[in-house]
Image: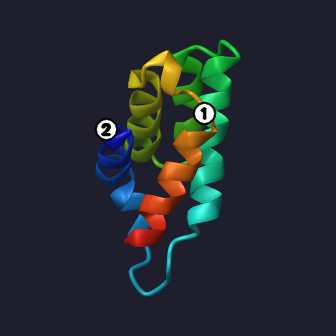
Protein backbone atom coordinates (compact mmCIF):
# COMPACT_ATOMS: atom_id res chain seq x y z
CA UNK A 1 0.00 0.00 0.00
CA UNK A 2 2.96 2.32 0.46
CA UNK A 3 3.41 2.23 -3.29
CA UNK A 4 -0.16 3.49 -3.69
CA UNK A 5 0.54 6.41 -1.37
CA UNK A 6 3.76 7.37 -3.09
CA UNK A 7 2.37 7.09 -6.60
CA UNK A 8 -0.64 9.13 -5.58
CA UNK A 9 1.56 11.90 -4.27
CA UNK A 10 3.75 11.97 -7.34
CA UNK A 11 0.98 11.63 -9.88
CA UNK A 12 -1.58 13.97 -8.46
CA UNK A 13 0.48 16.67 -6.82
CA UNK A 14 -0.08 18.99 -9.79
CA UNK A 15 -3.86 18.53 -9.53
CA UNK A 16 -3.82 19.01 -5.79
CA UNK A 17 -1.69 22.14 -6.03
CA UNK A 18 -3.50 23.74 -8.97
CA UNK A 19 -4.81 26.51 -6.74
CA UNK A 20 -2.25 26.93 -3.97
CA UNK A 21 -4.49 29.37 -2.06
CA UNK A 22 -7.35 26.87 -1.79
CA UNK A 23 -7.30 23.46 -0.14
CA UNK A 24 -7.77 20.70 -2.72
CA UNK A 25 -11.10 18.85 -2.80
CA UNK A 26 -9.66 15.55 -1.66
CA UNK A 27 -13.03 13.80 -1.58
CA UNK A 28 -13.70 14.69 -5.22
CA UNK A 29 -10.22 13.61 -6.27
CA UNK A 30 -10.58 10.32 -4.39
CA UNK A 31 -13.96 9.76 -6.07
CA UNK A 32 -12.35 10.27 -9.48
CA UNK A 33 -9.59 7.80 -8.59
CA UNK A 34 -12.25 5.27 -7.59
CA UNK A 35 -14.14 5.79 -10.85
CA UNK A 36 -11.00 4.81 -12.72
CA UNK A 37 -10.32 1.87 -10.39
CA UNK A 38 -13.90 0.61 -10.75
CA UNK A 39 -13.72 1.05 -14.50
CA UNK A 40 -10.61 -1.07 -14.63
CA UNK A 41 -12.28 -3.74 -12.48
CA UNK A 42 -15.26 -3.66 -14.87
CA UNK A 43 -12.96 -4.24 -17.85
CA UNK A 44 -12.56 -0.73 -19.24
CA UNK A 45 -9.41 -0.67 -21.35
CA UNK A 46 -6.63 1.71 -20.38
CA UNK A 47 -6.81 3.61 -23.68
CA UNK A 48 -10.49 4.40 -23.22
CA UNK A 49 -9.98 5.43 -19.60
CA UNK A 50 -7.07 7.63 -20.65
CA UNK A 51 -9.12 9.37 -23.36
CA UNK A 52 -11.97 10.10 -20.95
CA UNK A 53 -9.60 11.38 -18.28
CA UNK A 54 -7.80 13.66 -20.72
CA UNK A 55 -11.19 15.16 -21.64
CA UNK A 56 -12.03 15.75 -17.97
CA UNK A 57 -8.59 16.78 -16.75
CA UNK A 58 -5.65 18.13 -18.63
CA UNK A 59 -3.55 15.84 -20.82
CA UNK A 60 -0.76 15.26 -18.32
CA UNK A 61 -2.98 14.62 -15.29
CA UNK A 62 -5.31 12.34 -17.26
CA UNK A 63 -2.47 10.26 -18.63
CA UNK A 64 -0.76 10.03 -15.25
CA UNK A 65 -3.95 8.94 -13.49
CA UNK A 66 -4.62 6.23 -16.08
CA UNK A 67 -1.03 5.01 -15.97
CA UNK A 68 -1.05 4.89 -12.17
CA UNK A 69 -4.33 3.01 -11.79
CA UNK A 70 -3.49 0.55 -14.55
CA UNK A 71 -0.09 -0.15 -12.97
CA UNK A 72 -1.66 -1.33 -9.70
CA UNK A 73 -1.76 -5.08 -9.12
CA UNK A 74 -5.29 -6.49 -9.44
CA UNK A 75 -5.40 -7.46 -5.77
CA UNK A 76 -5.05 -3.77 -4.83
CA UNK A 77 -8.08 -2.66 -6.86
CA UNK A 78 -10.32 -2.12 -3.83
CA UNK A 79 -11.93 0.77 -2.00
CA UNK A 80 -8.66 1.08 -0.10
CA UNK A 81 -7.13 2.88 -3.10
CA UNK A 82 -9.60 5.75 -2.77
CA UNK A 83 -9.27 5.85 1.02
CA UNK A 84 -5.48 5.90 0.82
CA UNK A 85 -5.54 8.60 -1.85
CA UNK A 86 -7.90 10.78 0.18
CA UNK A 87 -5.82 10.38 3.33
CA UNK A 88 -2.64 11.30 1.47
CA UNK A 89 -4.32 14.30 -0.18
CA UNK A 90 -5.61 15.58 3.15
CA UNK A 91 -2.12 15.25 4.64
CA UNK A 92 -0.68 17.70 2.09
Classify 59 as above or below 36: below
Q: Which residue is mark 2?
A: 3
16 lies left or right of 39: left
Compute the Cα span from label 2 to label 1: 17 Å
**Residue at image coords 40%, 70%:** 91
Mark 2 packing: few (<14 Cα in 10 Å), some, or many (20+)? few
Q: Position of residue 53 (x, y in %)?
A: 56, 38
Q: Position of residue 52 (x, y in %)?
A: 61, 33
Q: Nearer the viewer, residue 3 or 25?
A: 3
**Residue at image coords 32%, 43%:** 2
7 lies left or right of 58: left
First in residue order: circle 2 vs circle 1? 2
The residue furthest bottom is 21
Classify 87 as above or below 78: below
Classify 84 as above or below 23: above
Q: Secondary structure at mark 1?
A: helix
- The numbered disc on residue 61 is none
Q: Secondary structure at mark 2?
A: helix
Q: How many marks?
A: 2
31 lies left or right of 66: right
Q: Position of residue 49 (x, y in %)?
A: 58, 26
Task: Give the colouring mode of the picture.
Answer: rainbow
Q: Position of residue 89 (x, y in %)?
A: 45, 63
Query: In the picture, which quadrant includes the N terminus?
Result: top left
Mark 1 packing: few (<14 Cα in 10 Å), some, or many (20+)? many
**Residue at image coords 49%, 61%:** 87
Asked if labels 1 and 2 touch by Cβ distance under 8 angstroms, the answer is no
Query: In the picture, which quadrant includes the C terminus?
Result: bottom left
**Residue at image coords 60%, 32%:** 78
Q: Which residue is mark 1?
A: 36
Amino acid sequence: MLRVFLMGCVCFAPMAQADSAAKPDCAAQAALVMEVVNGRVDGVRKGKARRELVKSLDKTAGEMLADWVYSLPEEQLTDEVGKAYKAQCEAM
